[in-house]
Structures are given as C-alpha cells and as structure tokens.
Amino acid sequence: MGIDKDNIKTQDETGEKAPMDQVEERVEAEMERLKGEAKKSVGEGLQDDKLTREGERLVEEAERKLEKIEEK
C-alpha cells in the first residue's frame, strides 16, 4: 500500500501550526506571566500600587493567552 500523493495536505493548507511554534507561544506566555508575578510582588513590597496593578494586568493577559493556546 502506497501513499496517495493527491490526498496529502500540508500544515499551511490545514492551518495547523507546527509543534515547535506551539511550544514557542506557550513559553512566551509563561514568561509574561512570570514577569507579571515578579512585578506584582515587587510592587507589593514597595507598596507601589501602580506597579502592583501592572503586574496583575500582565498575569491576567498571560493567563488568557495560555487558555487560548490550550483551546487550540
């Protein structure tokens, strides 16, 4: 049994991302979440409400990105 070359579809045709690209997105989102957590902790330690809110915002954005990645 051979491969039918007429029925082969590429990742570009199906819209599927390569596994390497999927990992890269997840790593970037995780790094953003960690950066947000660090800013939040520093803001709390310095009692800097602006920095704390910025950290919280980064964490929330990163978590949304991670959820979107997991849905794919």
Image: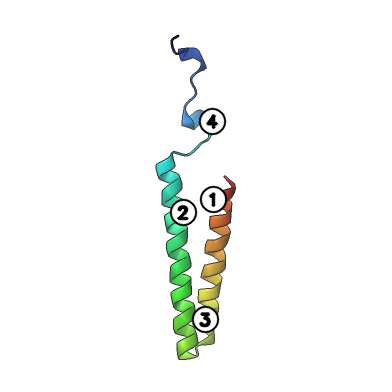
Q: Nearer the viewer, mark 3 or mark 2?
A: 2
Q: Furthest residue to the bottom?
A: 47
**Quadrant location of the C terminus in the rendered image:** top right
Q: Amino acid at mark 2?
A: Arg
Q: How far is mark 1 from mark 3, CA to CA?
A: 26 Å
Q: Amino acid at mark 1?
A: Ile
Q: Amino acid at mark 4?
A: Thr
Q: How many marks?
A: 4
Specify which label sits upstream in the sequence, 1 or 3: 3
Specify which label sits upstream in the sequence, 3 or 4: 4
Q: Which residue is mark 3?
A: 52
Do labels 4 and 1 touch, CB within 8 Å? no
Label 1 secondary element: helix
**Quadrant location of the N terminus in the rendered image:** top left
Q: Which residue is mark 2?
A: 26
Do labels 3 and 2 touch, CB within 8 Å? no
Label 2 secondary element: helix
Label 4 secondary element: helix
Nearer to the camera, 33 or 2: 2
In percent of the image, x 42 and y 56: which residue is there?
27
Q: Amino acid at mark 3?
A: Thr
Q: Which residue is mark 1?
A: 69
Q: How far is mark 2 from mark 4, CA to CA?
A: 21 Å
Specify which label sits upstream in the sequence, 3 or 2: 2
Q: How far is mark 2 from mark 1, CA to CA?
A: 7 Å
In percent of width and height, residue 29 lies at 47, 59
Do labels 2 and 1 touch, CB within 8 Å? yes
Numbered circle sitting on residue 36? none
In percent of the image, x 54 and y 50: which residue is there?
69
